[in-house]
Image: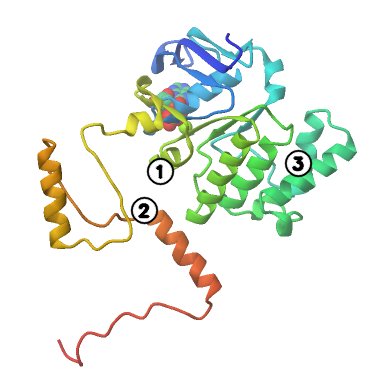
Amino acid sequence: MAGDLVVQTQKLTKVYRDFWGRQKKIALRALSFEVKRGEIFGLLGPNGSGKTTTIKLLLGLLFPTEGEAFVLGKTSNDVRKNEKIGYLPEESYLYRFLNAEETLDFYGRLFDMDADTRQRRSAELIEKVGLKNDRKRILREYSKGMRQRIGLAQALINDPELVILDEPTSGLDPLGARWMKDLIVDLRNKGKTIIMCSHRLEDVQDVCDRIAILSNGELQAYGRVDELLQDTRRVEMRATGLELSESLRRDLEAVIKKHGGSVDTMGHPTTTLEDYFLKIVEESSSRPGRRYLPETSGKGGR
Ligand SMILES: Nc1ncnc2c1ncn2[C@@H]1O[C@H](COP(=O)(O)OP(=O)(O)O)[C@@H](O)[C@H]1O
Ligand SMILES: [Mg+2]
């Protein structure tokens, strides 16, 4: 395994069997991919495409039917490597009757951290995930979004080299999802490697450096997000400081025609609904009391 690789899988295959050992479901078929140190790698695919299965194989929670995976220089079945891995599962598995502090203290003990370190680390993480005011409440009372936050804090308790997140933005509202994505990028900027899986395309496009797209357990596409999404048949140019006048249109069309092309569209770019939504919410908190009043149409009657 080369030094710049954190994960390498070779023809990883998983067949789930039923109670009598009969073949039930081929969840993954000969999956080979690599994750490089310091990148955000996205596993993308519809429900049931094998994302969670892949993650569980990397963690050694499942054994491959065929093929193998190496993680942090060890085979995936070697549990010692998990000391350097943080994992946020898809389903919450935290103890519902512990509060946030007790939860992190519990996981800190599992990693053999001493009391002082546990306390310092847990206070830092609770602050980081924005649960300071709710740290004494038991998790049963937490919303789905709050459970994702404490789940993430738990995944970071051991200051892992590799962070594996299964559907990290599920159940979060747009503000929470943006917060989670910013935090993921921040972890990468601090030198961590992140593997996340998601069926929400906008999450993956915003944060991932490279992705693998799975469908029915098979790899369909693999590579850098910017390269996969680049449409080399079209040319786009953006400009500021001028009006989109008829004469500008005519001039541009003439230039493009001269170079052998044709204009498909020309106009003003649109923003994403996510950016627009965040802007509106931000503005509303800086200008309380302002609200949108629909224009009244005409005077009475229809
Ligand atoms: N323990 C299991 N036993 C049998 N089939 C399973 C089991 N876990 C997952 N599967 C099946 O394997 C396929 C892949 O599942 P999964 O990896 O959870 O997909 P994803 O995370 O992409 O939604 C699905 O068809 C699912 O029903
Ligand atoms: Mg899943």
Determine whether 127 is above or below 75 in the image: below
- Quarter-of-image position of residue 15: top left
Q: Ligand 1 is found in which quarter of the picture?
A: top left
Kindly identify the amino acid type of the residue bearing the numbered disc 2. Thr
Q: CA distance from mark 2 to mark 3?
A: 37 Å
Q: Is residue 52 visible?
A: yes
Q: Is residue 61 visible?
A: no
Specify which label sits upstream in the sequence, 2 or 3: 3
Q: CA distance from mark 2 to mark 1?
A: 10 Å
User: Residue tagged by mark 2?
Assistant: 272
Q: Quick check: marks 1 and 3 in contact, CB under 8 Å? A: no
Q: Where residue 257 appears, x then y in whole percent?
A: 10, 41
Q: Nearer the viewer, mark 2 or mark 3?
A: 2
Disc 1 crowd rating (10 Å Cα; few below 14, some 14-19, many 20+) is: few
Taking the spot 24% from the left edge, 39% from the top edge, the residue there is: 235
In the picture, the disc for residue 286 is: none
Q: Where residue 274 appears, x then y in whole percent?
A: 41, 54
In the picture, the disc for residue 104 is: 3
In which quadrant is the N terminus drawn? top right
Disc 3 crowd rating (10 Å Cα; few below 14, some 14-19, many 20+) is: many
Kindly identify the amino acid type of the residue bearing the numbered disc 3. Leu
| Pick the front one: 16 or 187 | 187
Q: CA distance from mark 1 to mark 3?
A: 30 Å
Kindly identify the amino acid type of the residue bearing the numbered disc 1. Glu
Helix, strand or loop status at disc 3: helix
